[in-house]
Image (spheres, helix red, strand yellow):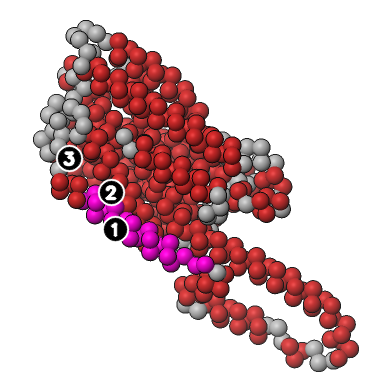
Amino acid sequence: MYTFTQRLKIITYVLMGLGLIGLTIGFLNAPSTVAEAQAMVADAHGGHGRDHGGDHAAAGHPDDHTDAGHADDHAGNHAGESTHADDHGDAHGEHLLHQLQNKPWAALYVAAFFFFMIALGTLAFYAIQRAAQAGWPILLYRVMEGITAYLVPGSIIIYVFLVLTGLHANHLFVWMDAETVAHDEIIQGKVGYLNVPFFLLRAAIYLIGWNLYRYLSRRLSLAQDNALVGDIRNHKLNFRISAGFLVFFFVTESMMSWDWIMSLDPHWFSTLFGWYVLASMLVTAVTVIALIAIYLKSKGYLPKVNNSHLHDLAKFMFGFSVFWTYLWFSQFMLIWYSNIPEEVTYFLTRIDDYNLPFFGMIAMNFLFPLLILMSSDYKRSNWIIVMAGIVIVLGHYIDIYNMIMPAAVGDQWFIGWAEIGGFLFFAGLFMFVVFRAISKAPLEASGDPFVGESERFVY
């Protein structure tokens, strides 16, 4: 049995504490008025906003129109232009305020979704192994089950966040704003699907279904360890519900991707998006499985897990990284080639305003694992897997950041208190829940009928 050490607990508490401090500062620093938002942007640009305003005032040339009759002729036009400018300025200021108010909420959402995604991806990978009757990963089942324990608190946090969003605590999903919908024909055509009650109902169905499978499969897995020799009824039932769950999962995962991420940009859509999010989910999940397995082995646990098991995990890290890149390129290429304005704006925004994180995450998620994990020898080296794994995890965190932030805050992004705090808090919470769950049961699924195959596994 694994012992959740006091030292590791303290580390998780510190991470959560620092994260809460960062998130709190991020929310407290958010502006409450348009004037505050404009002042923040002006300060961030070194007073450029004030200089720009002065240039506009100077450009008015009030002395040009000295003739009284000429001024009277254009008085009506100038009044109309002034009113239009005021309206435009008010709308721009309100939009800027919403962007800056969204910033801590979006940072919280990115971190909450990312760590929830790891647990969900692990659940899917675990179910695939169960349904395939795979023998090699059985000695890693307890690690996977420990990671999926985060689904429960992660689901609660995600759902509470979505409810608060539906109650207009933030402005992340523009289709939830009745005034915006009233002036947007494209969103009006999607109201039958994009409405708050149906949105929350779908989210509840996804979360309940995923958590129900996790509960049943974990229960059957532990029960099989205590079953009589030769009694594999629990194993067979686990196989059947795993196969059924995968059908439910692949449908709901795509819908979740549309609902929770793609609908942030309700004018844009991609038929590859569900697969793209799934690829990111799976590669991050397998990477975390490998990192935790290596950590446990370094502490003297999992003695029967050998280099061949880690080699297979590294192969999945490599393969899913290539799969993710294939989907990223396919989505990008098709949209770029078609050059439809409603579609290309998605990538133009990210290339223009998020140039470094956009291209940086491609290098981290494709070039780095491709070059490092291509060698079979490197896949058997723990320190290389750990190094590659850290880069992959951070790279896919940036990937989620790139999916969410442009729609939420536009070009008003930077890595600040809220972003760092959100990552630290959920990293600490994730570690606490996972290692606590791992300590609750034996690390070896000794009752599984194929455990011998896993023990003898050699690549």
Type of amino acid at the residue the image marks with label 1: Leu
Q: Are marks 1 and 2 in contact (CB under 8 Å)?
A: yes
The local crowd at label 3, few if under 14, some if 14 to 19, many if 20 or more residues have their Cα within 10 Å, is: some
| Image side of residue 237 versus residue 168, left or right | left
Of residues 352 and 105, which is closer to you in this image?
105
Mark 3 to mark 1 CA distance (whole Å): 21 Å
The local crowd at label 1, few if under 14, some if 14 to 19, many if 20 or more residues have their Cα within 10 Å, is: some
Type of amino acid at the residue the image marks with label 3: Phe
Q: Is residue 317 above or below residue 360?
A: above
**Which of pointers 3 and 1 lies earlier in the amino acid sequence?**
3
Which span is picked out in magenta? 11-32
Q: Is residue 34 above or below residue 13?
A: below
Q: Is residue 24 in the magenta section?
A: yes
The single residue placed furthest to the top in the displayed view is: 230
Residue plotted at (18% across, 43% down): 383
| Image side of residue 368 versus residue 309, left or right | right
Residue plotted at (52% across, 72% down): 36
- Image location (x, y in percent) of residue 52: 58, 78
Residue tagged by mark 1?
18
Q: Is residue 164 above or below residue 87?
A: above
Type of amino acid at the residue the image marks with label 2: Gly
Q: Is residue 23 in the magenta section?
A: yes
- Image location (x, y in percent) of residue 40: 49, 72
Mark 3 to mark 2 CA distance (whole Å): 14 Å
- Image location (x, y in percent) of residue 366: 37, 43
Residue tagged by mark 2?
428
**Which of pointers 1 and 2 lies earlier in the amino acid sequence?**
1
Residue tagged by mark 3?
4
Of residues 290 and 337, which is closer to you in this image?
290
Whether residue 339 is visible here, answered yes or no, is no
